[in-house]
Image: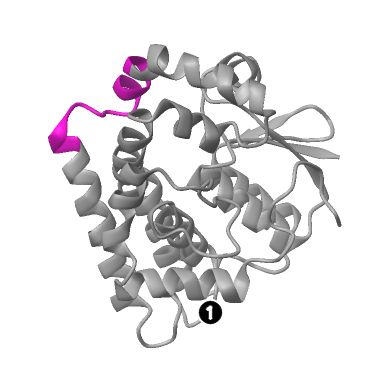
């Protein structure tokens, strides 16, 4: 069985979970802790980013865009990329825009808020761990925070403000782009919708998402995401999750299919 090495709270990883669920690809999920994950992932890929798909023969496919490409070849149904060349090009361009620009900018702002609350950071990213391990992890967070900030480009107030601007930019985009058909490309659901919805789920927090905020939500994080709730683009995110995210979205270990 193939194995997905993942962070539970990451749009790049959620994109791949969603694709695997839609295509009903049997797999095992292994959640990693940010920081301690680096040794495991670097040994496999030479880098430290997730998601990583470990295939049955021991080879790996790393990075969400590459994994989507592999899934489209090996498990083509249902198709996530359009057949029409122009639509396919547009879908890939939207995926790249979010992967390379929008998502990192929003992530800086989300991480900044979470890093200011070490115990809540631990509750989010060590959600699959025992309460004791979460507590121990929360003690590590302040020590690791400078490295996390540097690695993600969290350089100060301007970077945080830029992340908020990126969220508004992305919400404006999906609201306008999906107005006619409900979807971003070609009038049908596909990888562009998944990529945009998973990125925006970090600030919209739709139902049926594996990236739910641990309760009670930290007030600082709640204040960050509250202004986005009523945006028309946020309703699009909620609708996409409601229509297309399967009920088996959240699990550890072997898939239930």
Location of the C terminus (image quadrant): bottom right
Q: How many marks?
A: 1
Q: Residue furthest bottom?
A: 180
Percent position (x, y) of residue 248?
74, 59
- Residue 114 relative to residue 138: left or right: left
Residue 105 in picture, x, y percent from top left: 29, 43
Quarter that holds the N terminus: top right
Q: Residue at x 52, y 22 (%)?
A: 48
Q: Nearer the viewer, residue 179 or 155?
A: 155
Residue 224 drawn above or below residue 48: below
Q: How is the image coloured?
A: one colour
Left or right of 49 on screen, residue 116: left
Using residue 134 as the reference point, say whether residue 114 is left or right of it. left
Is 197 left or right of 28, judged from the image as shown?
left
Magenta includes 116?
no
Q: Is residue 99 above or below residue 57?
A: below
Question: How many residues crowd around disc 1 within 10 Å: few (fewer than 14), some, or many (20 or more)?
Answer: some
In reply to whether residue 148 is colored magenta, the answer given is yes
Q: Quadrant of residue 150?
A: top left
Can you say whether 179 is above or below 237 in the image? below
Give the prevailing secondary structure in the magenta stretch: helix
Mark 1, residue position: 188
Q: Position of residue 25 (x, y in %)?
A: 79, 54
Q: Residue at x 78, y 60 (%)?
A: 24
Let me know if residue 86 appears in the view.
Answer: no
Residue 28 visible within the image? yes
Q: Magenta region: which residues?
A: 146-159
Classify mark 1: helix, strand or loop.
loop
Foreground of the two, 99 or 36 = 36
The residue located at (44%, 47%) in the rendering is 217
Q: Position of residue 154 (x, y in %)?
A: 25, 29
């Amino acid at each position: 069985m193939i194995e997905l090495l993942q962070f539970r709270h990451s749009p790049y990883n959620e994109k791949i979970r969603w694709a695997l669920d839609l295509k009903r690809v049997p797999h095992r999920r292994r959640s990693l802790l940010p920081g301690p994950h680096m040794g495991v992932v670097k040994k496999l890929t030479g880098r430290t980013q997730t998601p990583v798909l470990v295939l049955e023969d021991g080879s790996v496919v790393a990075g969400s865009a590459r994994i989507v490409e592999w899934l489209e070849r090996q498990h083509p149904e249902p198709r996530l990329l359009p057949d029409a060349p122009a639509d396919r090009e547009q879908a890939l361009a939207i995926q790249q825009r979010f992967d390379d620009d929008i998502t990192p900018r929003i992530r800086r702002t989300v991480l900044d808020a979470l890093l200011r609350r070490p115990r809540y950071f631990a509750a989010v990213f060590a959600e699959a761990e025992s309460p004791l391990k979460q507590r121990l992890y929360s003690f590590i967070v302040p020590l690791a925070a400078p490295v996390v900030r540097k690695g993600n480009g969290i350089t100060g107030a301007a970077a945080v403000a830029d992340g908020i601007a990126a969220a508004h930019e992305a919400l404006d985009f999906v609201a306008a782009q999906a107005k006619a058909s409900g979807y971003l490309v070609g009038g049908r659901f596909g990888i562009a919708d998944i990529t945009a919805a998973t990125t925006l789920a970090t600030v919209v927090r739709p139902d049926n998402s594996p990236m739910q905020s641990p309760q009670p939500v930290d007030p600082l994080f709640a204040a960050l995401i509250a202004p986005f709730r009523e945006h028309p683009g946020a309703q699009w995110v909620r609708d996409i999750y409601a229509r297309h995210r399967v009920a088996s979205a959240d699990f550890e270990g072997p898939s239930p299919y």
